[in-house]
Image (cartoon, grey):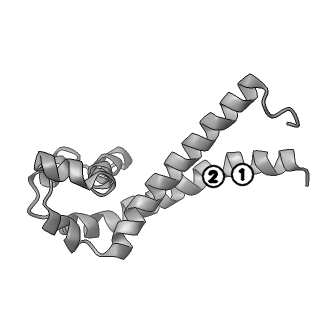
Amino acid sequence: MSLKLLILLLALSTPFVGLVLTWFVEYKKLDELESYFSENELVQRNKRFWGRNQPIDKTMRLSVIIGFFTLPKLHMRRGDVTEQELASVPQALRRWVTWPFYYGVLWLLCSCTWVIWKKWKILTFF
């Protein structure tokens, strides 16, 4: 297997891995995760608005909670979440929520870097 083929297979398969991880969190972990924020006004309002249990609804409900974990100080300063609410979520569940997000961000950065390198022809061996 050549290096080009390996990179092509990785570039095409990694988005699907991220999607599968995100779907797993949306369908298996979202209800448990929302139970830790049962008193949070923002999460409950978001749950009422996006409450049809369609895939887009679950994605939008999860995105608010991902924001809490990725930028906790910002959300605490704005009054969206308290430190006690964030501390009540178990570390394992927190990892299930944040890892697919960070995986997607890493894939996006790598893809942008690849496009820039190809545009400027820095990598001439591909």
Numbered mark located on residue 14 in the image: 2
Q: Are marks 2 and 1 in contact (CB under 8 Å)?
A: yes
88 up-or-down from 123: above or below: below
* Coordinates of residue 71 in the picture (x, y in percent): 29, 51
- State left or right for residue 22 relative to residue 67: right
Numbered mark located on residue 10 in the image: 1
* Coordinates of residue 110 in the picture (x, y in percent): 62, 43
Q: Amino acid at mark 2?
A: Thr
Q: State the residue lying farthest toward the top.
A: 120
Residue sitting at 41 percent across and 67 percent down? 96
In the rendered image, the quadrant that contains the C terminus is top right
- State left or right for residue 7 relative to residue 63: right
In the rendered image, the quadrant that contains the N terminus is bottom right
Residue sitting at 85 percent across and 44 percent down? 4
- Residue closer to the observer: 122 or 101: 122
Residue sitting at 58 percent across and 57 percent down? 17
Q: Amino acid at mark 1?
A: Leu
* Coordinates of residue 45 in the picture (x, y in percent): 12, 48
> How many marks do you count on the picture?
2
Q: State the residue lying farthest toward the right.
A: 1
Residue sitting at 23 percent across and 46 percent down? 50
- Residue closer to the observer: 121 or 8: 121
Tag 1's secondary structure?
Answer: helix
Tag 2's secondary structure?
Answer: helix
